[in-house]
Every structure is written in structure tokens, then in C-alpha cells.
Amino acid sequence: MGDKIDYGLINARKAIQELHAYVAEPVRTARDRAGIIQAFEFSYEAIWKLLQKIAEADGLSVNSPREAFSFAFQKGLVTDQKIWISMIRHRNLTTHVYREDVAQEVFRAIVDSYVQEWDFFMDNLP
């Protein structure tokens, strides 16, 4: 892979490792949960930027997470498009984590689905 993609891979792996470290700890307070949500935001940004670099290497331009995730689905890099679309919705909701119901919904999705989906994605990159 090219230097830009390699750099993107390093960033995405670091972000996901950090998220794993946060998820591995007991969540005792709203601050703990907020830390996991923030680590999700970092991982999300790193992954969509990585996909943007992969698309550029393929001669395509993607300018948003939605376009990047669609590219990944079309390229066969992800298989469950529904989860990735849900990530977009939850990332957009993270500005409202002061609302308990929203924070809990986003937190549960991260712990129950997104971490595993990102692990699968990273493990299956060409």
C-alpha cells in the first residue's frame, strides 16, 4: 500500500486499540461512558479517512463518511452496510450525548456492534 494508506492504517489501528482499552474497563460513571463515545468518534474519523485514502488510490474521490462507507461496501471491504449506516447516524448524534437516552443508545451500539465490526474490517483489509 502507499504511504498515505499506511499512515491511515496506523492511525485507524491506534484509534481502535484505544477504544478497545476503554471498552475493556468497567463503566462506572457517565464520564467513563463519555470517554468510550469520544474514542468511538476518533476511531470513526480515522476509519473514514483511511477509506478516503484507499478510494483515492483507486482513482476515486470520496468526500464524506457516507461516500467512504458506500465505497467500502461496493469494494467488498465491509459486508454489513446497515451497521455502517447506523454508525453515521450515531456519530451525528454524539453531539447530543448530554441527553442520557442518546448517550446510552450510542454507547450500547459501540460496545455491542461497532468495535467488532471495525475489528473485522481491519482484519480483512487486503
Image (tube, rainbow, N blue to C red):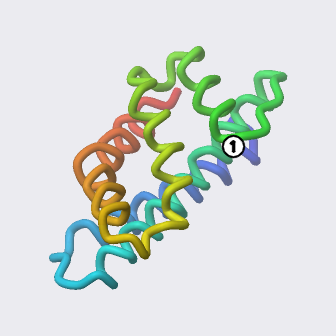
In the displayed structure, 66 sits above or below 73; it is below
Residue 27 lies in quadrant: bottom left
Location of the N terminus (image quadrant): top right
Determine the residue positioned at 43% across, 75% down.
98
Q: Nearer the viewer, residue 21 or 31?
A: 31
Determine the residue positioned at 35% across, 39% down.
117
Identify the residue position indicated by label 1 in the image: 5
Q: Is residue 54 left or right of residue 36?
A: right
Determine the residue positioned at 49% across, 62% down.
94
Dot 1: element: helix
Residue 39: horizontal and vertical position, in percent? 45, 67
Q: Is residue 123 left or right of residue 22?
A: right
Q: Is residue 74 left or right of residue 63?
A: left
Determine the residue positioned at 57% across, 56% down.
10
In the displayed structure, 114 sits above or below 125; it is below
Residue type, label 1? Ile
In the displayed structure, 62 sits above or below 4; it is above
Residue 112: horizontal and vertical position, in percent? 23, 48
Q: Nearer the viewer, residue 101 or 18?
A: 101
Number of marks drawn: 1
Residue 75: horizontal and vertical position, in percent? 58, 17
In the displayed structure, 81 sits above or below 42; it is above
Task: Classify mark 1: residues with Cα within 10 Å, few (<14), some (14-19) or many (20+).
Answer: some
Q: Nearer the viewer, residue 62 or 34?
A: 34
Residue 40: horizontal and vertical position, in percent? 44, 60
